[in-house]
Image (cartoon, helix red, strand yellow):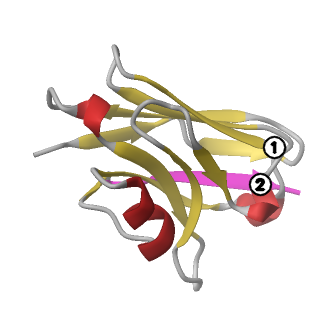
Amino acid sequence: QVQLVESGGGLVQAGGSLRLSCAASGRTFSAYAMGWFRQAAGKERELVAVINSIASTTYYLDSVKGRFTISRDNAKTTVYLQMNSLKPEDTAVYYCAADPVYSSMLLDREANYWGQGTQVTVSS
């Protein structure tokens, strides 16, 4: 069982930055691929970024490439999403997710464990 708790969301002006954190419980954090999804009001959930268990492979949604960076600290059982040059279209609830299989999260856009979500609002 893995429990995920996100933090770091908030209101920021366009062009600003935020760093989301996701603290995970459990001793097997280092065995999980970790990802960030988002869901804007009235839209479907989309996969924003994924990092594999040993941080050797990452994936980014095209619209966030060059602006967002996913990273993880296995010793702290925490995954991060650094978001720079934020745009109003980045406004959404951001969810942290964990799955033992990187390709499942990447290809199926699903995960075994989910956080409760944190709101990110970017004003123009």
Q: Is residue 102 visible?
A: yes
Please state, as top left, top right, bottom left or bottom right, where the C terminus lies in the image.
Answer: bottom right
Q: Residues within 10 Å of mark 1 (few under 14, many from 20)?
A: few
Disc 1 and disc 2 in contact, CB within 8 angstroms: yes
The amino acid beneath tag 1 is Arg
Q: Image height check: is 114 above or below 33? A: below
Q: Secondary structure at mark 2?
A: helix
Q: Distance between the Cα atoms at labels 1 and 2?
A: 5 Å
Segment colored magenta = 116-124
Q: Image height check: is 73 above or below 92? A: above
Residue 43 on image: x %, y %:
59, 83
Q: Determine the main secondary structure of the stretch shown in magenta.
A: strand
Which residue corresponds to the image point at 39% horizontal and 36% vertical from the top-left?
Answer: 53
Give the residue pinned by disc 2.
64
Which residue corresponds to the image point at 81% horizontal and 43% vertical from the top-left?
Answer: 67
Give the residue pinned by disc 1.
67
Which residue corresponds to the image point at 45% horizontal and 32% vertical from the top-left?
Answer: 79
The amino acid beneath tag 2 is Val
> Which is more toward the observer, 33 or 89?
33
Q: Is residue 52 left or right of residue 39?
A: left
Q: Image height check: is 47 above or below 84? A: below
Q: Image height check: is 79 above or below 89? A: above
Q: Which residue is outermost to the top?
A: 75
Q: Is residue 14 left or right of residue 73?
A: right
- Toward which corner of the image does residue 70 lie, by quadrant? top right
Check if residue 117 falls in the magenta segment: yes
> Which is more toward the observer, 46 or 17?
46
